[in-house]
Amino acid sequence: MNKLCYHFNALRNKSTSSSWPCRHGPLWFSTATATAAAAKTPKPHSLVQYLVDSCGLSPESASKACVHLHKARPPSDPDSILRFLKQAGFGNAHVAKLVSKDPRFLYTNLDKTLKPKLAILQDLGLSEPDIADLVSENPSSLWLSDLRTRLQFWQSLLGTNENLLKACRRNSYLLSTSIAGRLMPNLSLLRERGVSDCQIANIVLRIPRLVTRTPEMFRAVLVRAEELGFSSTSSGRFRCALHCVACNSKEAFDAKCELLKSLGWSEADVVSVIKKHPMLFNLSEENLRQKMGFFVEEVGFEISSLLTNPAMFSLSLKRRLRPRHSVMRVLKGGEVPAVKANDFLMSDKSFLERYVVPNKEKVPGLYEAYVAACAEIKIRPIANMALF
């Protein structure tokens, strides 16, 4: 019996011992007296140390995992499980993530549970790296009796294993959510509104947590999106509207509308931007306030310009908007330049090629300061780059 087994047996009989240093790190010990044990046994190891040394967890994560393992039955041979996972293509990071998320796998029955479940994943066409990613991100899959049925359901809808892995990474409850109780009713609500399976797959990939809600909550999201004017489910903005409604309560959404009005937007402006770029309302109120201040007070945009190009609100203020504006001001000798929305919206490559690279010689340090600013690296300002 290995060290981990000793610890679990000790847990079962901890009332007979008084030498427990802490709740998360009880010592390995025999049934001998403390004095005899100290004389005859090597330096003891704690369960926390086992999880750190053998599974790659940080001490903090190991302590948290112990809370769950204290309630577990003793495993027969956790070391053999770790060896099997390594042989099956699980790297150290996979093992650490799996143990951290669900320590129970240490007492999984290797022959009755773990090997058959991994065999199912192989049968369905997943590679070893894919299996390691899927199981470590979704450890609950090890306990599903109908794992094959669930995987086939998602493979059929999402089309590829790559899409399946992407969706599961974004929602660890995707595989464990009831197909009959939640998924099918929710998908039926979408199909009733004319949403194709291809569009449904796109919604799952973009907002996987939405489809795992209860049918009542899911229906409420659809109704709210329709109330905002997104009755055409064929539009790509319909998905964005679903995302927006799913991430905001009605109270939070209304509060953001009132904030925009307080910053100079009319009711018509707010309605217009909701239809053009509903994702704007996924920003926090503070984020909206900061970006409005930047666009209006620093750049000099009119609200009409913001309504025409609302996607600018989705750009990072620190890593994109301010660095680009600073470049434009440096090139204009510190004057407030006539910046266009496209200067912010164009790709990084295009901005570099148009404004930064051609001026590397004229403005020494421009390129380095711009790249550092985009990466939020604090550097010592140079003479004509103090704005960065």
Image (cartoon, rainbow, N blue to C red):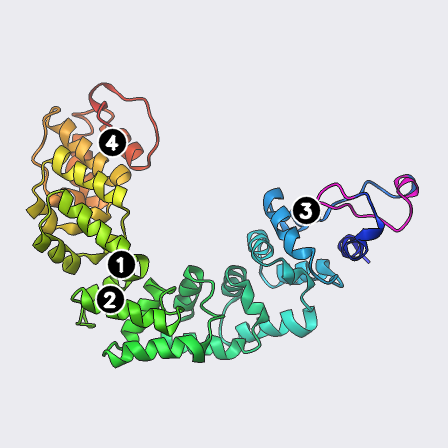
> Quick one: SS at disc 1?
helix
Magenta run includes residue 26: yes
What residue sits right under mark 3 in the picture?
24
Under mark 1, the amino acid is Lys
Q: Earlier in the sequence, mark 3 or mark 4?
A: 3
The residue identified by callout 1 is: 250
Relative placement, left or right, of 69 versus 319 is right
Amino acid type, mark 2: Arg
Q: Residues within 10 Å of mark 1 (few under 14, many from 20)?
A: few
Is 100 placed left or right of 181 in the picture? right
Q: CA distance from mark 3 to mark 4?
A: 51 Å
- The x and y percentages for residue 131 are 52, 65
Mark 4 highlights which residue? 367
- The mark lying in front, picked from 3 and 4, is 3
Closer mark to the observer between disc 3 and disc 2: 2
Residue 357 position (above or below residue 61)? above
Viewer-side residue, 95 vs 294: 294
Q: Earlier in the sequence, mark 4 or mark 2?
A: 2
Magenta stretch? Answer: 20-38
In the drawing, does residue 118 fall left or right of residue 152? right
Q: Which residue is at 42% across, 68% downward?
A: 164
Q: x, y percentage for residue 223?
A: 25, 70
Residue 284 in the image: state x and y as whole percent. Answer: 28, 47
The amino acid type of the residue labelled 4 equals Tyr
Where disc 4 sits, the SS reads: helix
- Point out the tag, 2 or 1, that comes first from the N-terminus: 2
Q: Mark 2 sits on what residue?
A: 224
Within the magenta stretch, is there residue 142?
no
Q: Is residue 345 visible?
A: no
Q: Amino acid at mark 3?
A: His
